[in-house]
Each structure stands twice: as C-alpha cells, then as structure tokens.
Image (cartoon, helix red, strand yellow):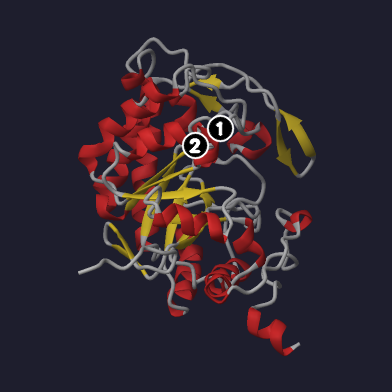
Amino acid sequence: MTTAPITLHTPLAAGRLHLPHRVLMAPMTRSRADDDGLVGPLTAAYYAQRAGAGLILSEAIYPEPMGRGYVRTPGLTDERQAAAWRVVTDAVHRAGGRIVAQLMHAGRISDPSLLPGGATPVAPSAVRPAGATFTDAGMRPHITPRALSAAEIGAIVASFGAAARRAIAAGFDGVELHAGAGYLPMQFLSTGSNLRSDRYGGPAINRARFTLELLEAIVAAVGADRVGLKLTPGMVFNDIADADLLDTYGTLIDALRPLRLAFLEMAPGAAGLGLHEALRERFDGAWFAGVGFDRAQGEAWVAQGRADAILYGQAFIANPDLPRRFALGAPLNNADQDSFYAGGARGYIDYPLLDAEVSA
C-alpha cells in the first residue's frame, strides 16, 4: 500500500485545529484599528475575504495597554475590544474559515505617545534599541526603556492569560504567542537585550522563563491544543541580537515540549536552514514555516517534510483567494506596498478575486 504524497492541499491536524489544507495566512499588521484599539467592519470584511486559508493567523493584538507598539493596532485588553473582534470571527466562520488570535507585547519597541499617560516603554533591561517607531507624527527615535520588576513581569504574564480567555470568548479558534521580531518575549530571550541577573536573566533557561510563563498562562486559560508559538531566531529586526541561537532556542523548545502546543511558527530564512532543521527535530507539534515562499517552494517544503504548512503574507494581502489560485495555477495579483498601513479600504479589501478577473 502506497501513501499519497503530501502537498499544500493535504489536510492537516494541529492540536484541535483541523485545517483543510496547508496554505496559511501569515500574521500581518495592517493598521486599520481605531485609536481605541477597536477593529471594525473593514477588518471583518478583510478576514472574511481570506477565509479560504487553511488557517488565518491574525495581525498582532496587544494584550494590555503597555504592549501597544504601533498606531492603529488592535487590542484584546477589555470586553469592548473583544466584542469588536467577535464581529470579525463570526464573519470568518460564516465564510467557512478558521482564525487564531496572535498576542504580541511590543516592549521597548514602542513610544510614550502610544502608551497610557505617556509612559516609558518597558523591557527586560534598560537597553535602548536602534531605530524608530512609526507614529501619526512621523518616525520617532526609540528611547531607553525602563527595566521591568519581577512583580510587573507577573502582571504581564497574567494579562496574556486574560487576553487569551477573551480571544476564545470572542470566537477565535486558538491563540498564538508572538515571541519573535524583537518584541518583548524575544527581548527576554536574547543576550543583547537581556542583561538581568535575576531568575529572568543569565543562562538560556532563565532568559526563556518569561516566554515559558506566558505560554503556561495561555495554556491554562484555553488549553494547549489550540495554542501556538511564533519564533524568529536569527532575525535582526528591531535591533535584536543573540550570542548563541542554538543554545537559546534549543533550550526554549526543550523546555516547552511538556506543554504539547498545537503548533510552532518559524521563519527559516532568518534562522538558516541548519538551525531550522535542528530546532524542528525538537518540537512534537505541527511546524509552520513562513516568509518569502512562493507556491513551488511551499510545495517542496511540505513534500520533503521540512514544514507541515506554509504561511503566506503579501501574497494573501493581494490575493484573497490565494489557495484557489495555487490549486488552479492561476496568476497572482501584485501587492500595493504603499497601502499596507495606510488605513481605509484601498489595498485592504479591494483586491479582485479570480472569478471577477476572468469575467472582467
């Protein structure tokens, strides 16, 4: 008896998530929330148009007000924000899709103009990152953050658990912790930004503690079989650096294995193929790879077992019906990068579907 080859169109189980195929929509900030962190009808339409994805991973959502890092990004800090997300998840489910909430705390990658009372951004240590924050007043250079106390760390952990509960109550099918791209969990993980000497600093297992505590809080709130983790080892975005990636991330993945998470998302290009393969061997759940894949590369990776599913970003922005286009070998629309964070409907919900193009 022969086994059918695995393709992008083969169904996949990731914990309790049952995906009809392996073409997934990557989490992407689009800056369409209002100043109160509320999503609206445009966001519901945007995600519903893309409900044909095997799984939608939402844009980054801040779990508590100090976690906000960019203008017009959404939150899950209270019941009002959760109710706004319910309109989105209902629209996705009516269209036959599945959607996971990605929770992200920006940490030092923020600006007082975005935080309650003009507060100073927080971090594991008072290490100022290079770069700037995008605000309505333009780009503002990052400032030196304030180091978190142990008690404040505990409060942030609790906020993630509370936000995860709100996510499920709002209709999301699962929750992903964003622990990459230079944001707060990665700031704790990385030797260049974590100079602490307490139980959250020093050896890799201590630097991993914050991420592990966040995962434990989320798992306790919603169950491990609908929880995922995003990692970006090797990515230098947001001025992040680590002296030993294999030690840091191998230690983290070994320590989280008993949690039995549903999936782990990683960007292999940043890590390098060798590190990607070494880390994949240490994780038991579904493995999602993303950033820079085209259809042929994605097919090759799932066929070779290098990943269980592939995340597509800009291709999904410009092609709401991307899985169908892949299945038919149809041409793709090009993404308008100028509209990625511009607000409004243009470049958000106005990309044509394949049938509309054929009939035009």
Q: In the figure, 158 relative to 239: above or below?
A: below
Q: In the figure, 241 relative to 62: above or below?
A: above
Q: Quadrant of the C terminus?
A: bottom right
Quadrant in which residue 331 is drawn: bottom right
Residue farthest to the front? 1
Whole-percent x, y for residue 335 in the image: 72, 60
Q: Are marks 2 and 1 in contact (CB under 8 Å)?
A: yes
Task: Read off the residue under disc 2.
Answer: 232
Quadrant in which residue 49 is drawn: bottom right
- Answer left or right for 227 relative to 62: left
Q: In the figure, 96 relative to 165: above or below?
A: below
- Answer left or right for 231 relative to 313: left
Q: Amino acid under label 2?
A: Thr
Q: Secondary structure at mark 1?
A: loop
Task: Read off the residue under disc 1.
Answer: 235
Count neighbours of disc 2 (C-alpha within 10 A) and say few if under 14, some if 14 to 19, many if 20 or more: many
Q: Amino acid under label 1?
A: Met
Whole-percent x, y for residue 296 in the image: 55, 59
Q: Which residue is found at the position 26% from the left and 31% from the top? A: 255
Which is more toward the observer, 226 or 167? 226
Which is more toward the observer, 319 or 50? 319
